[in-house]
Amino acid sequence: MEQMTYKNSGVDIDAGNKSVQLIKDAVKKTYRAEVLGDLGGFGGLFALKKYAEPVLVSGTDGVGTKLKIAFMMNKHDTIGQDAVAMCVNDILVQGAEPLFFLDYLAVGKLNPEQVAEIVGGVAAACSESGCALIGGETAEMAGFYQTGEYDVAGFAVGVVEKKNLITSSRVKVGDILIGLPSSGLHSNGFSLVRKIIFEHKKFKVTDKVDGLEKNIGEEILTPTRLYPKICLPLIKNFGNKLHGMVHITGGGFYENIPRALPKNFGAEIDANSWQVPKIFKLLQEWGNVDWHEMFRTFNCGIGMILIVDEESFDDFATHLNENYEEFYKIGRVVESGGVKIIRS
Amino acid sequence: MEQMTYKNSGVDIDAGNKSVQLIKDAVKKTYRAEVLGDLGGFGGLFALKKYAEPVLVSGTDGVGTKLKIAFMMNKHDTIGQDAVAMCVNDILVQGAEPLFFLDYLAVGKLNPEQVAEIVGGVAAACSESGCALIGGETAEMAGFYQTGEYDVAGFAVGVVEKKNLITSSRVKVGDILIGLPSSGLHSNGFSLVRKIIFEHKKFKVTDKVDGLEKNIGEEILTPTRLYPKICLPLIKNFGNKLHGMVHITGGGFYENIPRALPKNFGAEIDANSWQVPKIFKLLQEWGNVDWHEMFRTFNCGIGMILIVDEESFDDFATHLNENYEEFYKIGRVVESGGVKIIRS
């Protein structure tokens, strides 16, 4: 009888090792001075600098079915940014500086070049966020994912001095909500996006649509914006004047804004205070989606919200203007009543 | 036209919220004093205690296609232990105490009771490993995984004083290798396991086989052993006398032992020094698998190896005996020649 091997059961350790060779340099470029050791250890090593009372803040997320768009377009170099962004934006809102990141990649058939594209995107996004990519797992799961398909998830750890931790306790009635633009759909709501665009409207990813600069596929695959570059200086410079931050992730405005507010506080948002980008308007129209559902599912153009002291608003505005950062005064914290979004 | 919603596209935020309610208590039971805040924050918060030079050690892993066995048996309460074990065993070998864990769970259709079973297993394993489950993501990816199927991955962070970090520098020629038993197959090599058992031999999970106490499905689904309970006291009590540890994970003996050795050092293992468990012998025989391939793919009964000073061996043996822990003197560190496994 013929000998059975791990390789002929569909798992190729050599291909795994080849992937590691291909991603090595991109990964090393993300290293910060605190990274000890090298690739290939059992665990990733990070020497924490001196903090009086360090609080580690960690988050994990995947990119959901946005992956399907990457498969349809056979474009794998930006989905890694989505995985990084979904995690680092989550830890950022508690005032933490992202320190390091690990990725989990599960593939049907290990194609070292494809793995290198995906992880290259992860590494580039880590560099832009200032965090080191110190570990990862690439699992070849034969008969689990289709050949050429995969799932990717990430884990980020950051740190903040305990006294600087952002909790809802800073938030006061009357605080101003400043909206920072998203880069597009980010990585939420793609089951609905795909249903509207490909099932209902029967578009192809290469189709062009009036009002969108890019073709449909490129438009919706636009990677999630990384907010550390804009938000870390705000955290550093404004300290306690920054009362809170909200990452508009799964659950949209309605489920995320309350996470940053004291219990029973509410928020009033004026949806006319910014221009909802075309892609959201098209999705709303094509799918006849109720606007409440739109704001519960999508970021509708606002990926991050800053909650600031009313008196400090002008200082924040000046800082953002000086750094050529777009922003909108989108609402206020109110005494009660949940999240209310006004559209005229 | 009918309104389209996120829910009718296959993603049910309410079912997600129900899952959170179901797992809440199990998750809270894992909390240590250092955990701040509560479920529902954007990031998991962990206040690090005082260390002179803390090194954070982190690892991520999934459970591979062992998941298919859980699906075949419709048994979801132990696979979470596999995810935890694969990660904490990796960080343990560098001398780190596991502090906290996050899980990533991607499901085809969100069934809150099934999610509670899976995460319940994660939480129980976290408790046994002494680490807090401070975050997680449950992604409903409609049209991505089959209904009832899922993928799960984990991420663990531990800490060790820099001077106590275990690196290969402690290892000397002549050091003794002590093998600690595995609980079974752990979570590696399942593509080959499934090919041999279900494709080639055409067994069903409920089949009984001579020499195995449990039925085939139960035997191979046995969760990966958690080594923190046995290894943390060794790290604490023996300090520098413990020269290294090896988690026998993907790549088996041949790829993992060298990760704990200085470059160019080798190891000689006497495979007759322990009783290779029946399941490995059956897999070898059924699949006509070469023994080299067996030791490159499976743990063959040894899930963790301690590398210890020759003079301290008796002290380790006494400690292990006093704690009723099974162990085997399986080999030695040698000057060169890679990993050599002797079988008579």
Image (cartoon, coloured by chain):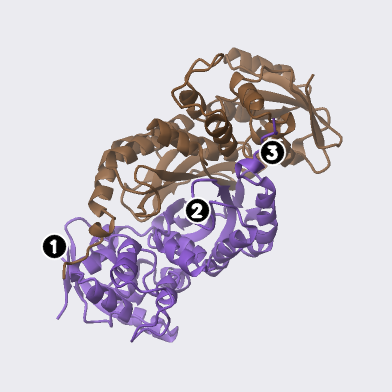
Chain colours: A brown, B purple
**Quadrant in which residue B224 is drawn:** bottom left
Q: Badge 1 is on which residue?
A: B336
Q: Badge 2 is on which residue?
A: B146
Where residue B280 is drawn, which disc sits there?
Answer: none
For the residues bearing labels 2 and 3, Cβ distance under 8 angstroms: no
- Look at label 1 and name its amino acid: Ser
Which chain does the residue under circle 3 lie in?
Answer: A
- Which of label 1 and label 2 is nearer to you? 2
Q: Secondary structure at mark 1?
A: loop
- Which of label 2 and label 3 is nearer to you? 2
Q: CA distance from mark 1 to mark 2?
A: 49 Å
Location of residue B65 in the rendering, given as x and y in whole percent from the top left corner? 39, 60
Q: Which residue corresponds to the image point at 40% horizontal and 33% vertical from the top-left?
A: A121
From the viewer's perspective, tell me whether residue B221 is left or right of residue A264: left
Q: Badge 3 is on which residue?
A: A256
- Look at label 2 and name its amino acid: Gln
